[in-house]
Image: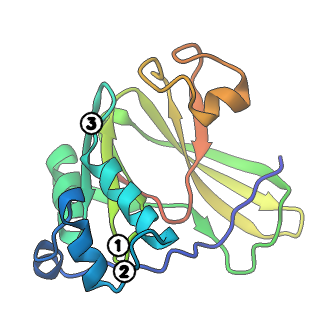
Amino acid sequence: MNLHFTKSTNAATFLPRDEANSIPFSSSKLSEVFDDFSVKPGSLEAELMKNTVKECEGPGIEGEEKFCATSLESMIDFSTSKLGKNVQAISTEVGKENQAEKFTITGVKKIGDGKKAVACHKKKYPYAVFYCHATDRTRLYMVQLVGVDGTKTKAVTVCHTNTGAWNPKHLAFQLLKVKPGTVPICHFLGEDDVFWVRN
């Protein structure tokens, strides 16, 4: 299997909750945020920030409860509100030395389903912002992989079993040449993604 597990280049870190809450996070206040973080309007960084806020403000898809976390505390609050207090955070583990592109699967372990998980995806912003969502009809797995160079990777994998409400132009449908709602869509998660599951 040919795969690319690249090290994350998104080095933005969380701000403390009080500090994050004091900074406006809305499309109507973006010019203020650009000034605060010395971001030039119209630049690539400004466009990435604009896209992050737009995605956070937009509606979720059918069956999705979403929230954009601007602090670690708010991420934990959202996850525990959906899962209860006894939770564990898991993510893909890419070794520093991992240069392999060809991998063999050496093990698969089911770690949860959509009623017991919250996915948080890191977005482009000057400080850490995670798009978190609790979705139904998903299955989660931890997949152990070994590269041809001997490096080992543990990759969180999610399978979406209900894609009927997805945009028909979604890249997954184009790559797999299938239509929404016809087959489960499975994918590995990046190193920046965090899955919260019940213990």
Judging from the image, what secondary structure is the residue with disc 2 in? loop
Residue at 54 percent across and 22 percent down: it is 168
Q: Could you tell me which secondary element the residue under label 1 belongs to? A: loop
Labelled disc at residue 28? none
The residues bearing labels 2 and 1 have C-alpha atoms spaced at a distance of 5 Å
Label 3 sits on what residue type?
Answer: Pro
* Relative vertical location of residue 33 with respect to residue 57 in this rendering, above or below: below
Q: Is residue 52 visible?
A: yes
Label 1 is placed on what type of residue?
A: Ala
**Residue 195: image location, x then y, percent:** 40, 54
Label whose residue precedes the other's in the sequence (3 or 2): 2
Q: Quadrant of residue 162?
A: top left
Q: Position of residue 21 (x, y in %)?
A: 12, 72
Between discs 2 and 1, the one toward the N terminus: 2
> Disc 2 residue type?
Thr
Q: Is residue 187 above or below residue 120?
A: above
Q: Nearer the viewer, residue 161 or 49?
A: 49
Residue at mark 2: 13
The mark nearer the N terminus, 1 or 3, is 3
With respect to residue 5, does 175 lie above or below?
above
Give residue 59's mark: 3
Q: Quadrant of residue 131?
A: bottom left
User: Of discs 3 and 2, which sits in the foreground?
Assistant: 3
Q: Nearer the viewer, mark 1 or mark 3?
A: 3
Neighbour tally class for label 1: few under 14, some 14-19, many 20 plus, Cα within 10 Å: some
Marks 3 and 2 sit apart, C-alpha to C-alpha, by 26 Å
Using the image as rendered, state which of residue 67 and residue 22 is in the foreground.
Answer: 22
Residue linked to disc 1: 128
